[in-house]
Image (cartoon, rainbow, N blue to C red):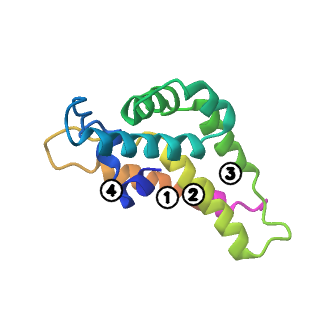
Amino acid sequence: MLIALSAKNKLTIVNGEYKEPTSTSPLKPHWDRTNDMVISWILNSVCDSIANNLSFIHTAHALWTELIEHYSQLDNHRIYQVSVDISNLRKETMSIETYYHKLKGLWDELDALEAPYACTCVCICENGKKNGEREQKKRFVTVFDGSR
């Protein structure tokens, strides 16, 4: 959604940079149209049950903030499910390309869901490199596990 809003040059209205002008400002009609358009895009992009609960919100910024507060939480259940899906994925009758595509998609989703290991020290250390190597080893074992 951020990519679509950025492509349409509408990020400033959802992040609050484009403030609502006063009712006497000549920019108010433009802001209202833009705000309503972005709200419409967002509500049409989410499932009906979510959209119905958000239809009372009247600014794109408030709507965006509400979505972030409720849906950007780390979902441990989803992390668990993706991890199980990775463990259970078998090549069976799939082509190697299809199998790898599905596995890569699951890895990418898991990477997006899990917070990265952050090195906060100011020294030059090997933490990031070691963490990356550990993740690659886990993936290697998944791909080359003899039961697949």
Asked whether the residues under the numbered discs 4 and 1 touch, taking CB atoms below 8 Å apart as contact, a structural biologist would say no
Tag of residue 139: 2
Q: Tell me the element at label 2.
A: helix
Amino acid type of the residue tagged 2 in the rendering = Arg
Camera-side residue of 89 and 70: 70
Image: 121 above or below 91: above
Camera-side residue of 74 and 147: 74
Seen at 33% across and 56% down, the residue is 9
Camera-side residue of 112 and 6: 6
Q: Name the residue under label 1.
A: 136
Q: Which of marks 1 and 3 is nearer the N terminus?
A: 3
- Which mark is nearer the camera, 4 or 2? 4
- Which mark is nearer the camera, 2 or 3? 3
Q: Which of marks 3 and 4 is nearer the N terminus?
A: 4
**Left or right: 25 in relation to 44:** left
- Residue that lies at the very extreme toward the left in this rendered image: 122
| Distance between the alpha carbons at the discs numbered 3 and 4 | 37 Å
Seen at 37% across and 46% down, the residue is 34
Tag of residue 9: 4
Q: In which quarter of the image is residue 141?
A: bottom right
Asked whether the residues under the numbered discs 1 and 2 touch, taking CB atoms below 8 Å apart as contact, a structural biologist would say yes
Q: Circle 2: is it few (<14), some (14-19), or many (20+) Cα within 10 Å?
A: some
| Distance between the alpha carbons at the discs numbered 1 and 2 | 5 Å
Amino acid type of the residue tagged 1 in the rendering = Gln
Image: 113 above or below 90: above
Camera-side residue of 56 and 45: 56
Tag of residue 86: 3
Q: Tell me the element at label 1.
A: helix
Q: Earlier in the sequence, mark 4 or mark 2?
A: 4
x%, y% of residue 94?
Answer: 80, 71
Amino acid type of the residue tagged 3 in the rendering = Ile
